[in-house]
Image (cartoon, rainbow, N blue to C red):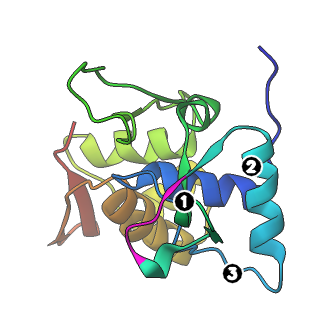
């Protein structure tokens, strides 16, 4: 199978759609000007990473068709596999229009994995320790905790003030 190369914008739009329970592309969260959204979506349609489905919400309409009415875009199973998102379990009772179930496959040796390991360690981690492990600035480390780990991955991160170390962050999620 040929590997599909995605631009940054295509990756953002596709990963956002795959991250939604219904797999829908709209509303677009990427900051694009002019006809860029149309061009990116047309390219993803051409590669069969998106498919047209009937729109149930007028705020998510991609185009209007005389025969089918309002149409929107949804990520295809190929989109999930291209992004490395695999099906957790396939069920025969799933509706035909439902997006496939997904689990996110994590890569080893990443900074994300290193930070999570630090947070899971017995004593947790301070911002300074995360900065040393990742070579990030302090604001980047704090943003990563609240953005990538809490909001995107849904980890529960707690913090407490420890006299000898300062503010220590921990997670108990697996």
Label 3 and label 2: CA atoms lie apart by 17 Å
Left or right, 52 with reference to 98: right
Q: Which residue range is magenta in the image?
A: 53-57
Cα distance in 3D space between marks 3 and 1: 29 Å
Q: Which mark is residue 44?
A: 2
Side of 60 relative to 172 (left or right):
right
Quadrant where the image shows the C terminus: top left
* Mark 3 or 1: the one toward you: 1
Q: Specify which label sits upstream in the sequence, 3 or 1.
A: 3
Residue 40 x/y as whole percent = 79, 61
Circle nearer the N terminus (1, 2)? 2
**Mark 2 element type:** helix
Query: 14 left or right of 1?
Result: left
The reply to whether dot 1 and dot 2 touch (C-beta < 8 Å) is: no
Label 3, on which residue? 31
Choose the circle earlier in sequence order: 3 or 2. Answer: 3
How many neighbours does mark 3 have within 10 angstroms: few (below 14), some (14-19), or many (20 or more)? few
Who is closer to the viewer here, 29 or 170? Answer: 29
Q: Residue at 19%, 41% (x, y): give it.
A: 122
Q: Which x, y percent locates residue 140?
A: 55, 71
* Image coords of residue 59 (percent x, y): 47, 81
Please report the residue visible at 39 percent of the width from the left and 58 percent of the height from the top. Answer: 152
Of residues 69 and 149, the one nearer the viewer is 69
Give the number of the disc on residue 68: 1
Q: Identify the residue at horizontal 79%, vertical 85% (top origin).
A: 33
Whether the residues at callouts 3 and 2 have beta carbons within 8 Å, the answer is no
- Nearer to us in this view, 148 or 44: 44
């Amino acid at each position: 199978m040929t590997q599909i190369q995605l631009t940054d914008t295509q990756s953002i739009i596709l990963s956002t759609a795959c991250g939604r329970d219904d797999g829908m592309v709209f509303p677009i969260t990427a900051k694009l000007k002019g006809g860029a959204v149309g061009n990116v979506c047309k390219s993803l349609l051409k590669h069969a990473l998106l498919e047209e489905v009937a729109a149930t919400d007028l705020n998510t309409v991609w185009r209007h068709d005389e025969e089918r009415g309002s149409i929107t875009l949804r990520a295809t199973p190929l989109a999930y596999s291209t992004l490395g998102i695999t099906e957790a379990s396939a069920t025969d009772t799933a509706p035909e229009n439902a997006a496939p179930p997904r689990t996110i496959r994590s890569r080893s040796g990443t900074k994300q994995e290193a930070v999570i390991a630090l947070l899971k360690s017995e004593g947790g981690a301070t911002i300074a320790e995360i900065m040393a492990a990742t070579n990030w600035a302090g604001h980047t480390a704090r943003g990563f905790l609240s953005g990538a780990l809490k909001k995107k991955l849904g980890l529960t991160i707690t913090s407490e003030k420890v006299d000898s170390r300062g503010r220590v962050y921990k997670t108990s999620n697996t």
